[in-house]
Image (tube, rainbow, N blue to C red):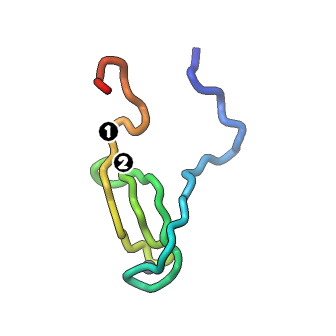
């Protein structure tokens, strides 16, 4: 049995949380926080949606939100 129901949406996307303030690189008020899969695995990033400048980039656990039983915490 699956733990999660089949999605009803035809396309899935990551929610992007808008952040206050201008981009330090281009000045556009387009900063957003979201999770991306890139080189080295998953990252929580804060990026400018206009010029893609990274303000912050923090690695997240290898399995993302999934925590296997017995892996602690
Ligand atoms: Zn920018």
Quarter of the image with the N terminus in it: top right
Residue named by callout 2: 42
Secondary-structure class at tag 2: strand
Q: Position of residue 46 (x, y in %)?
A: 41, 64
Q: Residue furthest top?
A: 1
Q: Is residue 36 left or right of residue 29?
A: left
Q: Position of residue 60 (x, y in %)?
A: 33, 45
Count the numbered circles shown. 2
Secondary-structure class at tag 1: loop
Is 34 located above or below residue 10 in the figure?
below
Is 13 located above or below residue 68 in the figure?
below
Instruction: Tell me the distance, in whole angstroms, between the alpha carbons under discs 2 and 1.
Output: 7 Å
Q: Residue at x 38, y 74 (%)?
A: 53
Classify the position of ligand 1 by quadrant: top left, top right, bottom left or bottom right. Answer: bottom left
Q: Position of residue 2 (x, y in %)?
A: 57, 19
Q: Nearer the viewer, residue 38 or 28?
A: 28
Q: Residue at x 36, y 23 (%)?
A: 68
Q: How dense is the environment of label 2, judged by Cα within 10 Å: few (below 14), some, or many (20 and up)?
A: some
Residue named by callout 1: 62
Q: How dense is the environment of label 1, judged by Cα within 10 Å: few (below 14), some, or many (20 and up)?
A: few
Precedes in sequence: disc 2 or disc 1: 2
Q: Nearer the viewer, residue 58 or 37?
A: 58
Q: Residue furthest bottom?
A: 27
């Amino acid at each position: 049995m699956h733990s999660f129901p089949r999605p009803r949406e035809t396309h899935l996307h990551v929610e992007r949380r808008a952040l206050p303030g201008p981009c330090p690189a281009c000045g556009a008020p387009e900063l957003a926080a979201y999770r991306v899969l890139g080189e080295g695995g998953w990252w929580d990033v804060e990026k400018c949606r206009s010029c893609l400048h990274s303000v912050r980039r923090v690695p997240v656990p290898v399995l993302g939100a999934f925590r296997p039983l017995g892996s602690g915490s």
